[in-house]
Image: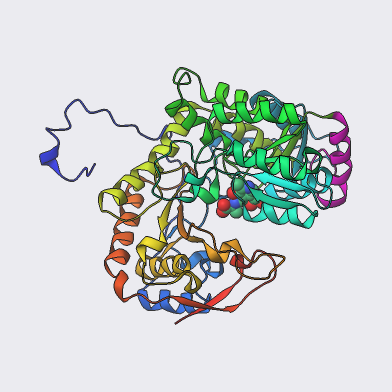
Amino acid sequence: MNHLVPQTMGQQFGRRSWAEPWKIKMVEPLRMISREERQRALEEAGYNTFLLRSEDVYIDLLTDSGTSAMSDRQWAGMMLGDEAYAGSRNFYHLEEAVRTYYGFRHVVPTHQGRGAEHLISQTAIKPGQFVPGNMYFTTTRLHQELAGGIFVDVIIDEAHDPESLHPFKGNVDLAKLEDLISRVGAEQIAYISLAGTVNMAGGQPVSMANVQALRELCDRRGIRIFLDATRLVENAFFIQEREEGYAGRSIAQILREFCDYADGAWMSAKKDNLVNIGGWLAVNDDSLFEELRNLVVVYEGLHTYGGLAGRDMETLAIGIEESVQDDHIRARIGQVRYLGELLTDWEIPVVQPVGGHAIFLDARRFYPHIPQDEFPAQTLAAELYLDSGIRSMERGIASAGRDPKTGDHHRPKLELTRLTIPRRVYTQAHMDVVAESVKAVHDARESTRGLRMTYEPKYLRFFQARFERL
Ligand code: F0G
């Protein structure tokens, strides 16, 4: 892949590479500060990459959330903002885009994903009910718990094994789900919380066969399915690539078919939908919509803006259309894979198969000498920043938080450091720089020590916790 090595050119004759289906029209300069300055910045941030200033970061792989580059069409859409308090034309454009591409009847805009999670949790969960899902997500589970729900992980076991090569590690284990239903009764299940792709498992997809079987089971038991559609377009790409019968279908067709098995969806539009802020909630049921439309006014804003400006809704509507283009999604996931393949070739432990939005370094295998209670994934994120100014994120014991009943740490099997790739932002050369830095940190692994938590906030602790070196 190295374009600087001419002797390989002969072997590459006849090769056909993919390339980004866009060119760059505007640039934002990057700055790398010195190692001493990075050391100081890291200490000031309490070894938590969330507490760094973005100015002190060189390549920012903290998240793919709200970090996308918008297209020229989206920027043009900014100028079409209809900032009327009620009934903005941009809302109707957004509604039409969600109906067309996701297929749900009623649409409620929200300021971002967790705004939608809050509303669906408050309306669809009765205190004491169970919410089975394909692995937890931090904000999703918290809103379910705040509504009195009890989250139960029903993902297949392979999802918890970073080395398993199962092509659809996001799948629901139907036997686990049936077992839960028979223990507690179908009326005690609020709904199935189904995410595609599964962020905490490494961006792993759910197969169409799985959602289809899930629908059949839920129809028999009278249970609703709500999707976390945050990265469902990326999920559609994996179905197109890996599932029999879908190679000839477009991403838009696959997305639509997947959604047809569900009763509704919530969305963090800051990911797949290519905007810097925004979210939505969409359902088919009329009376549930009535409730949601009423509740959104309390927490987000009127039901035709939900915390968004008219221009935000316009860029979101355009972003939805762009996000389902086959060449866009192929290049997006292609870039993630490019980085994954470099690291895999250098025998650096990453979650396999490489998922849709990020490379997840397996911190347990990276630092086998650091026990989980000494935050190996948090340590790795800190070391990467120190080495090269690259910002990544912990997805392990700090993110998992505490069991609300016992107060002890949740100790997830997966102890990961996420290199999250923003959409349409960095080039292949940036990916090379990232890979080389991971390699340097890996080479120095044996002398690396873990961390101790010195400050722990009550909710979603990973965002603001502070650490010091042991
Ligand atoms: N669901 C999933 C699967 C997510 O990844 C996120 C956010 C949300 C819901 C919440 O959406 O941030 O718009 O309120 N994930 C970000 C991340 C923060 O970095 O993975 P939000």
Confirm whether the magenta stretch covers residue 334.
Answer: no
Q: Where does the image place residue 396, in percent across and percent down from the top left? A: 52, 61
Q: Residue at x 88, y 39 (%)?
A: 291
Seen in the picture, residue 253 relative to 65 is either above or below; the reply is above
Q: Where does the image place residue 124, in percent across and percent down from the top left? A: 81, 43
Seen in the picture, residue 321 relative to 299 is either above or below; the reply is above
Q: Residue at x 27, y 28 (%)?
A: 16
Q: How many marks?
A: 0
Res 226 visible: yes
Q: Nearer the viewer, residue 169 or 306?
A: 169
* Residue numbers of the magenta segment: 286-305
Q: Where does the image place residue 141, in percent across and percent down from the top left? A: 68, 53
Direction from residue 227 to residue 235 in the image, left or right: left
Q: Which corner quadrant holds the C terminus?
A: bottom left
Seen in the picture, residue 203 relative to 402 is either above or below; the reply is above
Direction from residue 316 to residue 121 in the image, left or right: right
Q: Where does the image place residue 245, in percent across and percent down from the top left? A: 47, 18
- In this figure, which colouring scheme has been used for the structure? rainbow
Q: Nearer the viewer, residue 317 or 462?
A: 462
Image quarter of residue 166 = top left
Confirm whether the magenta stretch covers residue 292.
Answer: yes
Predominant SS along the magenta part: helix
Q: Which corner quadrant holds the N terminus?
A: top left
Res 23 visible: no
